[in-house]
């Protein structure tokens, strides 16, 4: 059974005050009564920043210039990498690169305003750091999400997106989602524009199959908590990967299982320090997006290769040194629980009732070894979700380049075929066009402002037309 619906709103200005909130009954042609200017699919930091940008615009705009917006999120509440919210882990980007400051330093949604409301502003300043705790920044995100709660529906999984056609032209999209109150029912919402920010999905290597003993590091904290609560004995845990998450997982397991051996497996000789020097960090500047976007393909690839050390398969130097000290101390004490199996790879994984048998190959000699283990944590990164993977016909409307990658405009709008008047914006999945910041927090605030500006321009143009 399918019904139509609008998102609830505590602020009429968000929707221009011209339509009632609550469920719709459908128009004469069978579609939803309300047409949104933009529906966001996914509600992580990127679409949260867009929701704030829309809210701030609507608070000052005349009624006819307001943007009717809504956001759909399949999680039951706001959450961002909850499985890696390690107590003492800090952010790797400055707090000034929050949801708004790079776009509007005067915004009341800034991290500093959050600190002031939490009565911690002076205490934070006394820490003399640009990098808040990860759990603190997550609390900031939840605080901001709570302030725009009227724009988002949680527990709302999008299952299809269908083009709405008039006279052969795609003029809107019908977004079909599961009804949070009754998953057997579907809800349809109509929008002139979509903003897709479904994030990345955990990637496991081909040899690994997710199980009680094999999991991605994104599940680290709840998995470890469950093991500790159940009293399950962990004698040896293996961590696969060479990046920040892998190193953090090694450290976390080492601390929480004091009697276990923790083995880190990676193909490098050692962990590579992240390049966070001032000049290298300029690759994350807003103007760097313009330079990257307008560069020829071979220059784009060169820039990506040169600067991947700022983000990919690299580890903060403080953590590298901490792990090295721990290994040395254990060697001195004659009980080495932390082991680095470098220049190695996992060849195969056998699951048995009492644990795992992990085949390891030492790459320089091709020598094989087998580790009996209780856990395998795959800190093997994430991969983007394809735009047409879960959204039916949407991908067929988009133009692609010679490499079969989506063609995306500077305003983050996907290029579509000539008969498509409705718009699709992407937040993420645009590294090939917009550079390294596509999936990072660094330009979230600026990107949200650019998408908002494009929405306003496109809306005014359609009204004039």
Image (cartoon, grey):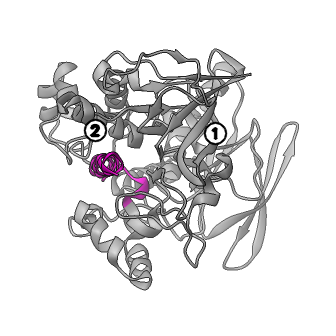
Mark 1 — residue? 260
Give the magenta part as a residue range: 437-465
Q: Give me the residue at 35% from left, 35% from top.
A: 51
Mark 2 — residue? 53
Q: Position of residue 60 (x, y in %)?
A: 17, 31
Asked which secondary structure carries label 1, the reply is: loop
Q: Is residue 331 magenta?
A: no
Report the disc number at residue 88.
none
Q: Is residue 273 visible?
A: no
Q: Position of residue 355 (x, y in %)?
A: 81, 40
Question: Picture quarter containing residue 221?
Answer: top right
Mark toward the start of the polypeptide (2 vs 1): 2
Q: Nearer the viewer, residue 422 or 215?
A: 422
Asked which secondary structure carries label 2, the reply is: helix
Q: Is residue 279 left or right of residue 402?
A: left
Residue at mark 2 to residue at mark 1: CA–CA distance: 48 Å
Q: Nearer the viewer, residue 229 or 305?
A: 305
How packed mark 2 is, by other alpha carbons closer than 10 Å (few <14, some 14-19, many 20 or more), is many
Q: Position of residue 10 (x, y in %)?
A: 34, 15
Q: Give me the residue at 39% from left, 43% from top.
A: 46
How packed mark 1 is, by other alpha carbons closer than 10 Å (few <14, some 14-19, many 20 or more), is some
Q: Residue furthest right?
A: 353
Q: Nearer the viewer, residue 203 or 338?
A: 203
Q: Is residue 140 left or right of residue 70?
A: left
């Amino acid at each position: 059974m399918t019904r139509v619906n609008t998102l609830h709103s505590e602020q009429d200005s968000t929707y221009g005050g011209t339509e009632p909130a609550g469920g719709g009954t459908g128009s004469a042609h069978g579609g939803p009564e309300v047409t949104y200017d933009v529906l966001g699919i996914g509600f992580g930091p990127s679409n949260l920043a867009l929701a704030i940008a829309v809210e701030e615009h609507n608070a000052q705009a005349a009624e006819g210039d307001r943007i009717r917006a809504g956001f759909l999120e399949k999680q039951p509440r706001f959450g961002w990498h909850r499985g890696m919210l390690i107590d003492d882990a800090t952010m790797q980007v400055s707090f000034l690169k929050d949801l708004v400051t790079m776009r509007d330093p005067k915004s009341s949604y800034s991290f500093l305003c959050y600190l002031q409301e939490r009565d911690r502003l002076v205490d934070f300043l006394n820490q003399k750091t640009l990098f808040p705790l990860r759990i603190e920044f997550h609390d900031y995100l939840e605080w901001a999400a709570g302030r725009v709660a009227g724009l988002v529906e949680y527990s709302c999984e999008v299952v299809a997106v269908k083009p709405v056609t008039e006279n052969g032209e795609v003029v809107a999209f019908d977004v079909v989602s599961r009804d949070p109150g009754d998953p057997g029912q579907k809800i349809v919402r109509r929008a002139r524009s979509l903003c897709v920010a479904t994030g990345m999905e955990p990637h496991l290597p081909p040899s690994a199959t997710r199980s009680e003993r094999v999991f991605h590091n994104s599940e680290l904290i709840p998995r470890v908590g469950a093991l500790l609560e159940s009293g399950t004995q962990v004698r040896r845990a293996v961590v696969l990967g060479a990046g920040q998450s892998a190193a953090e997982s090694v450290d976390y397991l080492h601390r929480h299982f004091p009697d276990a051996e923790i083995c880190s497996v990676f193909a490098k000789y050692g962990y590579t320090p992240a390049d966070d020097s001032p000049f290298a960090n300029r690759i994350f500047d807003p103007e760097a997006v313009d330079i990257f976007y307008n560069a020829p393909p071979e220059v784009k690839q060169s820039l990506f290769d040169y600067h991947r050390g700022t983000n990919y398969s690299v580890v903060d130097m403080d953590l590298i040194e901490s792990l090295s000290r721990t290994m040395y101390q254990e060697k001195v004490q004659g009980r080495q629980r932390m082991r680095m199996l470098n220049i190695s790879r996992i060849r195969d994984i056998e699951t048995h009732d009492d644990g795992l048998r992990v085949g390891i190959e030492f790459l320089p000699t091709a020598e094989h070894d087998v580790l009996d283990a209780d856990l395998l944590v795959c800190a093997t990164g994430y991969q983007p979700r394809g735009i047409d993977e879960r959204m039916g016909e949407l991908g067929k409307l988009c133009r692609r380049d010679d490499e079969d990658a989506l063609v995306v405009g500077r305003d983050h709008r996907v290029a579509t075929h000539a008969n498509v008047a409705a718009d699709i914006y992407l937040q993420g999945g645009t590294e090939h066009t917009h550079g390294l910041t596509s999936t990072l927090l660094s330009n979230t605030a600026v990107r949200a402002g650019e998408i908002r500006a494009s929405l306003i321009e496109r809306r005014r143009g359609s009204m004039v037309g």
